[in-house]
Image (spheres, rainbow, N blue to C red):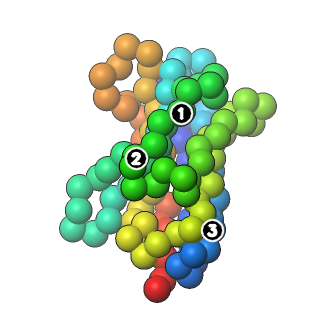
Amino acid sequence: QVELVESGGGLVQAGGSLRLSCAASGRTISIYRMGWFRQAPGKEREFVAAINWGGTTTSYADSVKGRFTISRDNAKNTVSLQMNSLKPEDTATYYCASKRAFAVQYEYWGQGTQVTVSS
């Protein structure tokens, strides 16, 4: 079992920045990859960014490339998402998730943190 807790959401003006963090606890040794997803009201959840647990491989949705950066803090068992140049369309609840090496889908999810970008 892996527990994930997000933090760092809030209200920011367009063009501003926020940094989200996801703290992992429990059986973290089993984690292979962690990702950030978001869901806006009335829309489906979408992928934002992902990183392998070793922190060497990252991937991003096209909509956030060049603006968001995912990173890993090995000592603290946390994964962060630095979000710059935020746009109103980035407004959503952001979730972090983890999966094991052979899992097809992400298995564990945090409770989510709200990000609101005002125009």
Q: CA distance from mark 2 to mark 1?
A: 11 Å
Identified by mark 1, the residue type is Thr
Q: Position of residue 15 (x, y in %)?
A: 57, 75
The mark tally for this picture is: 3
- In this view, the residue in front, 12 or 26, is 12
Give the residue number, with chain letter if any, for mark 3: 17
Residue pictured at 41% horizontal, 62% vertical: 93
Q: CA distance from mark 1 to mark 3?
A: 20 Å
- The mark that comes first in sequence, 1 or 3, is 3
The residue sitting at the top extreme is: 102
Q: CA distance from mark 2 to mark 3?
A: 18 Å
The residue sitting at the right extreme is: 75
Q: Does the CB distance between marks 2 and 1 fall below 8 Å?
A: no
Viewer can see residue 7: no
Callout 2 secondary element = loop
Q: Position of residue 11 (x, y in %)?
A: 55, 77
Residue pictured at 37% horizontal, 32% vertical: 106
Residue pictured at 61% horizontal, 33% vertical: 25
Give the residue number, with chain letter if any, for mark 1: 58
Q: Residues within 10 Å of mark 1 (few under 14, many from 20)?
A: some
- In this view, the residue in front, 90 or 20, is 90
- The mark that comes first in sequence, 2 or 3, is 3
Viewer can see residue 38: yes
